[in-house]
Amino acid sequence: MRSSLVLMLWMSLALPAVGSEAAPGLDLGRFIGGDVETGFAVADGPRPFRFPEDHGAHPDFRTEWWYLVTHLTDASGRPFSAQFTLFRQALAPPGVDSVEPTSRWRTRQVWMAHVALSGPDGRHQASERFARGELGLAGVRAEPFAAWLEDWRLAAAPSSALFPLALEAWVDDVERPFRLDLEFDEPRGPILQGDRGYSPKSARDGNASYYYSFTRMQAYGSIELDGRAFEVSGLAWLDREWSSSVLDPGQTGWDWFALHLDDGRDLKVFQIRRDDGSIDAASAGTLVATDGSTTALGREDFSLAPLETWDDGDGGSWPVAWRLEVPAAGVAGRVVARHPDQLNRLSVRYWEGQVCLDGPVAGCGFLEMTGYGSPTPAAMAPQGRD
Amino acid sequence: MSLLARAHLRHLWRDRWQTLLAVFGVSVGVAVVLAVDLANAASREAMQIAQRQLDGTATHAIVGAGERVEESVYPALRLRWRQGDPALADVRAMAPVVTAETRIGRDPTTMRHPLQWLGIDPTADAGIRAAVPGPGGGQALMSEPGTALLDAATARSLGIDPEAEAEANARIWVQGAGQPRPLRVIGTFSLGDTVLGQGLLITDIATAQEGLERIGWLSRIDLVRTVPQPTRPVALLLERFFPGLVVRTAAGEVEELEGGLRVESLAERAADTRALAASFQLNLAALGLLALVVGLFLVHGTLGHAVLRRRRAFARLRAIGVHADELRRMVLAEALVVAVAGVLFGLLLGRWLASGLLALTAGTLENLYGQVAVAALAPDPVPVAKAVGVGLVATVLAAVPASARAAAVVPAAAMPAEGQGSPRRRHPLLMLGLLLVGALALLPGTGYVGGLLAVAALLMVGALLTPAWITALLGALTRVLGRAPLRWRLLLREALRGLARSGVAGAALVVAMATALGMGLMVESFRASVDRWLDARLAAPLHLLLPGEQRTAPDDLLAAIADRAEGYVVRVSWPERIRGEPVRVNHITQRGTVPVDLGLALVAGDYDERGVLLSEPLARRLDLGPGATLPLPVAGGTRELTVAGVFREYGAGPGLVLVPEAAAIPLLPGQTGIEVHGLREPPDAVAASLAAAAPEGTRVRRNDELLELARGVFERTFEVTAVLNAIAGIVAGFGLFAALTALGLERRAQYGILRTLGVDRTTPAWLNFGEATLVAVGAVLLSLPLGVAVALILIEVVNVRAFGWSLDVSFPPWLFLQALAIGLAAGWAAALAPALAVWRADPAVLLTEARRHA
């Protein structure tokens, strides 16, 4: 699902360059037109997944990400939630390398990483970085697994191939610097999303991704905030997705829920909103049982209704309380954001934060929303320390 | 309206032509001052804009030996920074840069437009340079080799319309290393309205590395640091008020990193660029002030004489109770009216003149420093305020002596005008004081400003001396021509009597002529020195410039040269910085059966097998002489080399360090040139065979072509100077014209009497004309030694201090003859109209007019 987010990100990043002068070479039509650019590999149907290879990068597809969210508490019950995401974007299809690619800087891949943390007081902070795929500053290795951008790193712990996974990220270009030093183990998965890992995103052919997740991992470690270290533990969710497809022009945004239910099951539902106010038929979900077996949920199998909104002060109004019903899972309750402001004010704005579900089956997890506010803030935050 | 005010206005009206001339003098002076300032401000502003585009928010840069950094340093450094290395704690952003000066064109045969090629990494550069697109927009730059963004002004000058859709993806050719290679312009960006300085071409860092053949190398790593930059508001204001002044902060602390890398402040680097242009701007500013001074002579003369003519009126006014101070104020008020009118007109004139001057300046900058110039004047209040202030204050000050004279009129006095305000009034103390100031200004440590101050003092002494000098001259002539015919003696006496007025005009002429002559002599000395230098420097009949960057010339090419010539010199040169000074290191390898002459004129020290040679300007800036130790950055550290000698160098740009092969320094890749000596075959034959043996893209040039090119640049450089000189000369000519017209008017009664006594009409006209000639000859004779003195100060002090080069004094006689001719021509041109008027006039009219006038 998050492919759309990635595309919006890249599109928006192009905007500052457009300015009052001619757009320097960015062909927006290539993105918005919805056509899959020739030359890239396409997700066009179920495929066999091979591990550990598929933990690594698929450079022939246009976009790919390693998306980890975790909600934790410390010994005295203080809540934290954190995000680490590494995005890969191919700049050009494979096989169009120049005749004389002698510079080591000549690249086909650009990487972007986001790290965010919400602390016990509800303050949400996020940071982003970019790097080109050469000179070793960013990349992904399948085994032993490692995904990194500079010193932000999600990697297999020493002497393991994948789990336990360790996340290290030191963020000091925010008002209150923080450090994530977490480990993740006892994974549930890999869970293949959609149809055996093939996840259509619209009715159009090729608008689809390959998608698998580790929906539940035990998380533990330490978080340093304001110079204080907190020993924390909790649950985490890792999404892996790659595709070359793009959004349909009529699709304006989405609401994506990933919930760890208290009864041990995991629930993912997402809806894609259209510009006419309707919900796209490609909206779907997955219910993961405690044994890892999955039930696919179609558009008609769940309902989502916004209850309350939060104003971000820049004209964006984000639903931070929802009514969620999934009859097949026995879920019927309110999904409420732990804090209304979990907005990632980065090159593109999107809401990514912890929510909790009440009702007959309760649980906590993450909600991601896009398309409720201006996608690009007027002034782009320069990267680097501030 | 008060009686005084009416008298005052009536006078201004009655002498409207005189008043207009004074206004004109002020106008021209103000206009030139303003024009020079506006043009300088525009070029400075443009340079700053270009610098801002180039540096963005970056405050420092990490550089290595040869202005290059191995690229693997960057990721390692970036990781260290991210991991919190304390040495990099104040760094907020870090970005690699590959950059070089280059030329572009629409086709590979006309690579005319010089510009800066900036290779950046969009993923690291976002937020540093405004023109650089973010990683999203930069993806076409990154993914497609040979794509570029071009500044809109350069695009337009190449015939690419930035707005036109059809021109997107226009193909341009860029002089990378070696052969020109094509780039595709996929977008443009604005540098602002004024681009006087380099254009800017932005590509991905990979495209730059490939195009410039800098594979594996960065030019530098830019840093945005929070360390407080020296804020320099006072310095910047000073620089704006005094063009040509570059206030340097204390030499920026250069932090040494390991591996021969160092952190430099970008502001310091920019100051070097400013200093280069500033010494040039200073010359213009000095000439602008000269025009104003000459204009003020007009004011001084006009008002001074207006007072003389109204002595009777003033005496009457005093007799009816008008206080002396009121008369003083009245004259000053008149000056103020002249000043306001002159300044207003001067502002308009200056704005117009500035455009022309800017075009000339741009041409010079383009020739001197190889910069593209698309100049536009920006409204800038500072130069306007300065011109208004200087114009008003200077005009009123110029009227002070006249006002004092008005106040000194005693009520009863009604003496004839001309005897008063004696031309023999001398100012020995003032002159002595000025000479003292001039001498003090020449003391060491006063910089080139001191030299210019001395020139100014000398010129003022010359001006003060002029009336006395012409008096003495006329006295001597009177004695020599004691038995000459009456009309000769009459002429001499009339000329002597007229000096009260014509003396001031003569002084103006002296100042203008002495300056023009001084500048001319300096330029001639410069030209002669440059000629000799060029002849020696380009003595080798053939010069080869290899494409790209390398550490040596190909062996087979050297073998081919050895077959056809007695010897050769290989120069591998790369940019460097020594104690913050930009230099170019030249590694010299000499081979051949005969000792090869490097074509250097040593001003100190001697050749030494292992010692380095420094160009004279660099040696002065670094304050290093023979025997001193030069710390030369080399790959991985610094080498201490001994300075063997200092040689003459007149080239613009960085100082030169010549390192002989025996010094055994590790070479860096650089521009490689070969000078071929002692050809065994005709030059054209050798050139053809060497061109065939050389790598593709090698330029083979004959020395006569190079000489012609170099001299062309030199001529263009002094065009601006010549124009300003001419303006000062024209103003002085007008001064003389004004004085002679006034004399003619005053003498009308006298001429009328002469005519009624039966003297024919040619005599008065002859008197008028002859007087002009005498004053002009006197002025020119005085301006000759004065001009020589000015030239000597310019050569021995100003040039040495401003540019660091010494010149051979070369004073060709034709320049003196030319000055004499121009002075006489100016005098005659100014005298023609008044003399004709006298010749035409009817005696009766002359008499009645004269009576009315009195």
Image (tube, coloured by chain):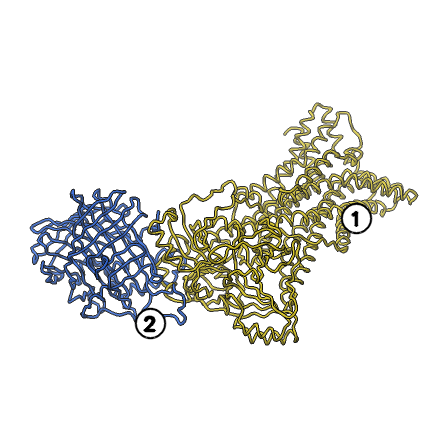
Rendered view: B89 above or below A251: above
- Chain that is coloured yellow in the picture: B
Q: Chain of mark 1?
A: B
Instruction: Tell me the crowding category of disc 2: few under 14, some 14 to 19, or many 20 or more residues within 10 angstroms, Cα based.
Output: few
Rendered view: A229 above or below A300: above
* Residue B128 location (% of width, % of height): 40, 52
* Residue A355 location (% of width, % of height): 17, 49
- Whether residue B542 is visible, yes or no, is no
Amino acid type at mark 1: Leu
Colour representing chain A: blue
Work out which quarter of the rendered image holds the N terminus of chain A and state it. bottom left
Q: Which residue is mark 1?
A: B836
User: Would residue B778 appear left or right of B659 to someone viewing this image?
Assistant: right
Quarter of image, res B719? bottom right
Quarter of image, res A240? bottom left
Q: Residue furthest right?
A: B483
As rendered, which of A269 and A161 lies closer to the eye? Answer: A161
Q: Which residue is mark 2?
A: A95
Mark carried by residue A34:
none
Q: CA distance from mark 1 to mark 2?
A: 89 Å
State the SS at label 1. helix
Q: Chain of mark 2?
A: A
Q: Residue at x 54, y 70 (%)?
A: B698
State the SS at label 2. loop
User: Would residue B628 appear left or right of B58 to someone viewing this image?
Assistant: right
User: Would residue A149 appear left or right of B549 to someone viewing this image?
Assistant: left
* Residue B371 location (% of width, % of height): 54, 58
Amino acid type at mark 2: Gly
| Callouts 1 and 2 in the same chain | no
Q: Residue furthest top?
A: B321
